[in-house]
Image (spheres, rainbow, N blue to C red):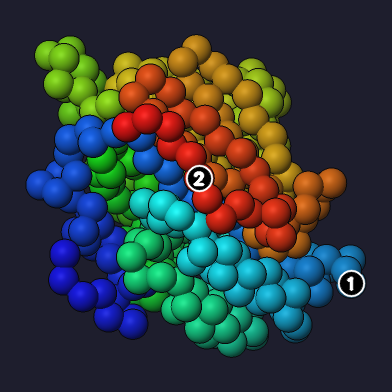
Amino acid sequence: MGEVGDEQMFLRATGRSFVGLSAELERSWRGPFYFAMGADPQLGLWDAWSRGACGTSGTMWERELALTHEAVRALNLLRPRPRFLTLCGDLVHDMPGQPKRNEQMKDLRNALRNLDPAIPLVLVPGNHDLGNEPTTESIASFRHAWGDDYFAFWVGGVRFLVLNSQLFVNTKACQREGEEHNNWLGKELAECTEAKKVGKDPQHVIVLQHIPLFLSTANEEDGYFNIPLDLRHQLIEKFQQAGVTAVLAGHYHRNAGGSVGPIEMIVSSAMGCPLGQDPPGLRLVTVTKESIHHSYYAMDKIPTQIDLGPC
Ligand SMILES: [Zn+2]
């Protein structure tokens, strides 16, 4: 992989794949590895929340910004290095059209620019990034700033699918994008399903998205924080056929999750403003040949050394 320039670090998701994490380079298993996951840095929420008006613009975001700097500092010290950092959506609080959005994005980007260039940054769109009702324009604007809103990539023999979960809940103003996303996902899952049948499957298939499929059980009622029940069950069935074993999401600002069949739903709390008891932090996810395990760390408790065991 060539040098990744300053702005290029935000635009590596392109052509529905990710520069440097291609099948050519990363298709084969080379032993255990780990990656880092953050969700909802959401610069501006803390201020809006403390005023009891989280739907309004966040006019200050020093706390979230300090936490983002702290996360980047901790990640840069980690050895071995995480194979990538994913931010699972809600990068900033102000939605498209809200007044502080550009300033929040500028500050977030400045903080993320300090990330060790050896750690690729994998960005996932959330409802605050696209709007609760995404439009063709809001999606185009996300792509312009942060790269593709859905794509797939490889790391050490493991297939990762990044989904645009907002298109699961509202496509009134972006039907074409919704259909394209569904078609693309169907094709990706079908490829995994076929590969599995002939025994050439990836070591694991892992999905990254913003809205959790569910918070604790697959049959729980529909709500703001999960995917609608009918679609949820369709996705779970297709994910199972394709060999998906883990789905990682944010959006809930609390740690949660559960399992359905072989799929673990991992809901990770926020890098920014928490809405429950969990402190702001990051999750480190270790992938071994047989399994995926993970731990959530408060931002000031992130270790400096990860033991991946015998390779
Ligand atoms: Zn969200």
Q: Nearer the viewer, residue 292 or 188?
A: 292
Report which residue position mark 1 lands on. 51
- Give the x, y percent position of residue 195: 16, 22
Q: Residue at x 20, y 23 (%)?
A: 201
Element carrying mark 2: loop
Q: Nearer the viewer, residue 139 or 297?
A: 297
Label number found at residue 306:
2
- Give the x, y percent position of residue 128: 59, 63
Quadrant of res 207: top left
Label number found at residue 70:
none
What is the residue that sits farthest to the front in this orientation? 310
Element carrying mark 1: loop
- Give the x, y percent position of residue 161: 34, 42
The local crowd at label 2, few if under 14, some if 14 to 19, many if 20 or more residues have their Cα within 10 Å, is some
Dot 1 or dot 2, earlier in sequence: 1
**Quarter of the N terminus within the rendering:** bottom left
What is the residue that sits farthest to the right in this orientation? 51
Q: Residue at x 10, y 47 (%)?
A: 24
Residue 188 seen in this snapshot: no
When the figure is inspected, residue 132 is found, relative to residue 247, above or below; the finding is below
